[in-house]
Image: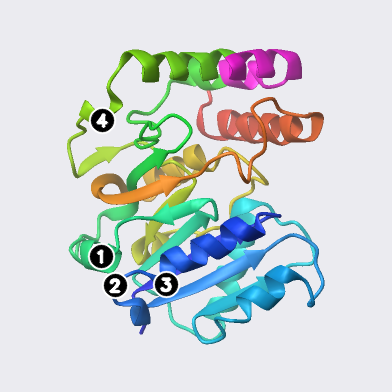
C-alpha cells in the first residue's frame, strides 16, 4: 500500500510540471509514493510534454482531461480515477506544479503524524520565490463575517479588485524590504485556520469524514472552504514548519492584475464562501 498520493495539476505549465515530477522522484522512499499529473490543457500525444512524461512509465501517471475542471476539480477527478483500482492512502497531497519539494524526507516526517486522527490537513512551510515570504499559515485565525462579506463586495468590481491586488502587492514588498524574513520564527506544530492552497496535505481521516475534494469552486477560495469543512467535521489543520516547499508562483495563475474571466471566478468563489459559511 502506498503511503502518499500526490496529485499535481498542470494547466499549460509543461516545463514546470517536468521539474515538479523530478522533484517528487528525488524524495526518499519514492516506492511508497504514487504521483499523478492531471493535465487540463488541450494537447496531442506527439507533443513535447507527452513524450517527456513517457520517460517515467512506471513512476508517473498522467491523466488527460478533455475539459478544464479547475484546480481542485481536476485533483478530485484524479483521485477518483486512482481509487478505482487502489485503496485510500494515508496522505493525499494536492499541489500546483510550480512547486519544488525541498524536504526529501517527506514520508518520514508525515509518518510521525499518521496516528494523530484529529489532523485533517497539514500545511507546510511554503517559501515564495517572488518575495521569500512564508505563505503558511495562510490564515492563522478564522476571519470575521464582516471581513468576508467586505471581500465579497470588493471582488465584485474588477477595477476595485485590481486596485486591492496592487496595494496588497506593494504592502508585501514593503514588508520584505524592511523586515528580515529569514529571522522570522513561527512555532512548529501549531493549529491554524487555513492552509495555503498551492500545496495541501490531506490525511485519510479527512476523506473518511467528508466529501473529499468535491469542492464547488472552480478557481480560488479553496483555502477557506477546506478550513470550514475541517471545522464542520471537527478536524484540525496543523502548520508543520519542518516540511519545506519552494513555490515558483505566478507560473500557473498569471500576472498580478486579474482579467475579466479570472476576476469572475474569484468573485464567485469569495461570494460562495461568504454566503455559505459566514452568515450574519
Q: Which mark is residue 25?
A: 3
Contact between marks 3 and 1 (CB within 8 A): the answer is no
Q: At numbered mark 3, what does the secondary structure look like: helix, strand or loop?
A: helix
Query: Magenta residues, as a range?
Result: 150-166
Secondary element at image label 2: loop
Q: Which residue is mark 2?
A: 28
Q: Position of residue 249 (x, y in %)?
A: 53, 41
Q: Considering only vertical position in the picture, is 78 above or below 12?
A: below
Provide the secondary structure element on which disc 4 rests.
Answer: helix
> Would you call the spot at circle 3 few (<14 residues within 10 Å), some (14-19), or many (20 or more)?
many
Identified at 64% across, 27% down, the residue is 256
Label 4, label 2: how far apart the Cα atoms are? 27 Å
- Judge left or right: residue 113 versus residue 248: left
> Residue 182 has which mark?
4
Q: Earlier in the sequence, mark 4 or mark 2?
A: 2
Q: Distance between the Cα atoms at labels 1 and 4? A: 22 Å
Query: Real-space Cα distance between discs 2 and 3?
Result: 8 Å
- Taking the magenta stretch, the answer to whether it contains residue 248 is no
Residue occupying image coordinates x 47% and y 14%: 171
Looking at the image, which is closer to me, 255 or 19?
Answer: 19
Indicate whether residue 159 is drawn in magenta. Answer: yes
Q: Earlier in the sequence, mark 1 or mark 4?
A: 1
**Mark 3 vs mark 4, CA separation in Å:** 28 Å
Q: Any mark on residue 105, and which?
A: 1
Percent of width and height locating residue 78: 59, 69
Q: Is residue 123 above or below residue 258?
A: below
Amino acid at each position: 500500500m502506498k503511503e502518499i498520493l500526490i496529485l499535481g495539476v498542470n494547466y499549460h505549465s509543461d516545463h514546470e510540471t517536468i521539474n515538479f515530477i523530478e522533484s517528487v522522484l528525488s524524495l526518499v522512499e519514492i516506492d511508497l509514493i504514487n504521483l499523478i499529473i492531471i493535465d487540463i490543457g488541450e494537447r496531442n500525444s506527439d507533443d513535447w510534454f507527452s513524450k517527456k512524461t513517457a520517460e517515467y512509465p512506471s513512476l508517473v501517471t498522467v491523466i488527460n482531461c478533455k475539459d478544464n475542471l479547475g484546480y481542485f476539480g481536476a485533483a478530485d477527478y484524479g483521485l477518483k480515477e486512482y481509487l478505482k483500482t487502489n485503496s485510500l492512502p494515508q496522505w493525499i497531497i494536492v499541489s500546483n506544479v510550480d512547486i519544488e519539494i525541498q524536504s526529501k524526507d517527506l514520508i518520514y516526517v508525515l509518518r510521525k503524524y499518521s496516528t494523530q486522527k484529529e489532523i485533517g490537513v497539514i500545511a507546510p512551510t511554503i517559501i515564495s520565490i517572488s518575495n521569500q515570504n512564508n505563505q503558511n499559515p495562510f490564515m492563522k485565525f478564522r476571519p470575521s463575517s464582516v471581513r468576508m462579506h467586505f471581500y465579497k463586495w470588493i471582488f465584485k468590481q474588477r477595477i476595485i479588485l485590481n486596485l486591492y491586488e496592487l496595494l496588497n502587492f506593494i504592502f508585501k514588498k514593503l514588508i520584505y524590504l524592511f523586515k528580515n524574513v529569514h529571522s522570522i520564527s513561527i512555532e512548529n506544530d501549531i493549529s491554524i485556520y487555513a492552509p495555503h492552497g498551492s500545496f495541501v496535505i490531506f490525511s485519510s481521516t479527512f476523506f473518511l469524514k467528508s466529501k473529499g475534494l468535491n469542492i464547488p469552486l472552480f478557481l480560488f477560495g479553496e483555502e477557506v472552504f477546506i478550513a470550514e469543512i475541517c471545522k464542520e467535521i471537527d478536524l484540525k489543520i496543523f502548520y508543520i514548519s519542518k516540511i519545506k516547499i519552494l513555490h515558483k508562483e505566478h507560473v500557473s495563475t498569471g500576472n498580478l492584475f486579474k482579467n475579466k474571466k479570472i476576476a469572475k471566478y474569484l468573485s464567485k468563489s469569495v461570494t460562495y464562501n461568504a454566503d455559505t459559511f459566514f452568515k450574519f
